[in-house]
Every structure is written in structure tokens, then in C-alpha cells.
């Protein structure tokens, strides 16, 4: 009876990590691994590469693009057990975060220091920043502030063969060399696995107001948006 219960739990766990919140058909992985450090990630990828085992990195699984679905089977690398990391450097307006840091936690921490982080995906109360970076998450504020890639200064990543790389400058200005951090951002885990990030912050707005405006046509709406942009009202 205990063995039946154990198998049931295993099956339930595999099913939990077989899909994301999108419409892609679930695929059961053969195993789930919960790394706790970058070194763990690198060791797993070295073994997987040596034996040609597919690996699907996964954050909170809130995305709707199928990136967390293990379509080739193999191993799901669930990043949720990394040590919590969320450090705000007020002087340089940067945040140092782990892959499993919740996006809303960063919003709240930055705002408590008078700073601001732009990307606001609809699942910000649950989604993790490693997944945001992998999928280049955006949200409604992307119209003004851009998507996640515009806020990434530096990344710590693990490649498919288990090599650990530091990408980007981690500073507000870093213009030499190839922009590999931007190449990884949005690659949905196909190029490297995000294990840590340095993100840009900006001063928070002094005032925020909400307007309800009625317009007669879609054309008038477009003209109103352009007029607001020209007037620097955002």
C-alpha cells in the first residue's frame, strides 16, 4: 500500500511539471531535478550533455508559451529551490537577484527604496525572474519601459555542456564585446540556464495618476496616445 502511495505521489509530481499555463499539450518528463546552486546546475548539464539527455529548465511555470513543457522528455530542471536572493544596491540603482526571486518581491523592494523596476508581467505575484529573463517577459508597462531585456545588466548562466559564464558588465554602461546577455534573454532556455542576474533600476515616479478617457474612434485613440507621448505624459 505504501509503495502504491509512493508511485501515486511520483506520478502526480511528474504531471505537475509536464506543462505550463499555456495550451501546449503536457509531456511527462522522466525525472525532475531540484538544483540549489549554480554548481549543481553545471554538474547536471555536464552529465546530461555526456549522455545526450534533454533538459528543460523551469521557473514557476506561469508562462503561456510552452517553454516549460518538456517536449523532448528527459529531465525538468526546477529552479525553485535556489537560495532566496534579492539585494538592492541603492547607490548604483541595481538589483542582484536569484533565478527564483518573485517579480513582485523585486517591485516591492525597489519601491521601498524609492526605485522602480519596469517589467510587470500579469503573473508578477507568482512568476520568477529567471523565467522572466528566459522568456523576455513584458506586461502592459512595456509600452513605456520595454521588456525584461532592457533591464538586464548582467547574467550568471550555465551552458548546455555545463560551463558557467558571466555575461554582461553588471553596470549601467558596458559597451565593449558581444552582447551575449541580450542573446540569452528571450532564448527560453535553449542557449543557457539563468542562475543569477543583475538588473537595472530607475528612480520611482514622484506621482502616479489614473485617467478614464472616452474617445469617439480607434483613430482618435491612436492620435491621443501620440499626443501624450509628444507631451511627455506617460
Image (cartoon, helix red, strand yellow):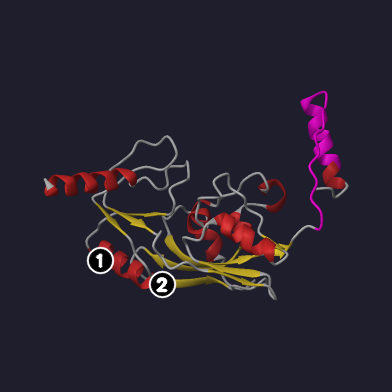
Mark on residue 104? none
Label 1's element? Answer: helix
Residue 127's place in the image compared with 167, above or below, is above
**Along the line of sight, which residue is nearer the eye, 153 or 178?**
153
Q: Residues within 10 Å of mark 1 (few under 14, many from 20)?
A: few
Residue 65's place in the image compared with 182, above or below, is above
The residue stretch that appears in magenta: 206-227
Residue 69 placement: quadrant: top left
In the rendered image, the residue lying farthest to the top is 216
**Magenta span has 209?**
yes
Residue ID for mark 2: 164
In the rendered image, the residue lying farthest to the right is 231
Residue 118's place in the image compared with 72, above or below, is below
Residue 233, percent across and down? Answer: 84, 48
How many marks the image carries: the answer is 2
Cα gap from disc 2 to disc 1, whole angstroms:
14 Å
Mark on residue 47? 1
**Along the line of sight, which residue is nearer the eye, 33 or 4?**
4
**Along the line of sight, which residue is nearer the eye, 109 or 51?**
109
Residue 100, percent across and down? Answer: 46, 60
Q: Residue at x 43, y 68 (%)?
A: 83
Q: Residue at x 43, y 54 (%)?
A: 59
Residue 200, percent across and down? Answer: 64, 65
Label 2's element? Answer: strand
Dot placed on the residue nearer the N-terminal end, 2 or 1:
1
Residue 180, percent across and down? Answer: 53, 65
Amino acid at each position: 500500500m505504501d509503495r502504491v502511495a509512493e508511485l501515486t505521489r511520483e506520478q502526480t509530481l511528474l504531471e505537475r511539471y509536464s506543462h505550463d499555463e499555456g495550451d501546449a499539450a503536457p509531456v511527462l518528463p522522466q525525472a525532475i531535478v531540484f538544483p540549489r546552486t549554480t554548481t549543481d546546475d553545471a554538474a547536471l548539464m555536464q552529465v546530461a550533455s555526456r549522455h545526450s539527455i534533454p533538459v528543460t529548465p523551469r521557473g514557476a511555470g506561469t508562462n503561456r508559451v510552452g517553454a516549460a513543457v518538456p517536449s523532448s522528455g528527459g529531465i525538468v530542471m526546477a529552479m525553485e529551490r535556489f537560495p532566496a536572493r534579492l539585494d538592492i544596491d541603492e547607490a548604483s540603482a541595481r538589483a542582484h537577484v536569484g533565478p527564483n526571486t518573485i517579480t513582485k518581491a523585486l517591485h516591492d523592494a525597489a519601491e521601498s527604496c524609492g526605485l522602480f523596476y519596469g517589467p510587470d508581467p500579469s503573473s508578477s505575484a507568482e512568476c520568477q525572474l529567471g523565467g522572466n529573463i528566459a522568456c523576455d517577459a513584458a506586461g502592459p508597462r512595456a509600452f513605456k519601459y520595454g521588456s525584461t531585456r532592457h533591464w538586464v545588466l548582467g547574467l550568471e548562466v550555465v551552458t548546455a555542456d555545463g560551463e558557467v559564464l558571466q555575461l554582461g558588465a553588471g553596470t549601467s554602461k558596458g559597451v565593449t564585446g558581444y552582447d551575449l546577455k541580450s542573446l540569452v534573454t528571450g532564448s527560453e532556455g535553449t542557449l543557457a540556464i539563468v542562475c543569477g542576474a543583475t538588473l537595472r533600476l530607475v528612480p520611482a515616479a514622484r506621482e502616479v495618476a489614473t485617467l478614464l478617457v472616452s474617445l469617439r474612434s480607434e483613430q482618435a485613440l491612436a492620435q491621443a496616445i501620440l499626443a501624450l507621448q509628444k507631451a511627455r505624459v506617460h
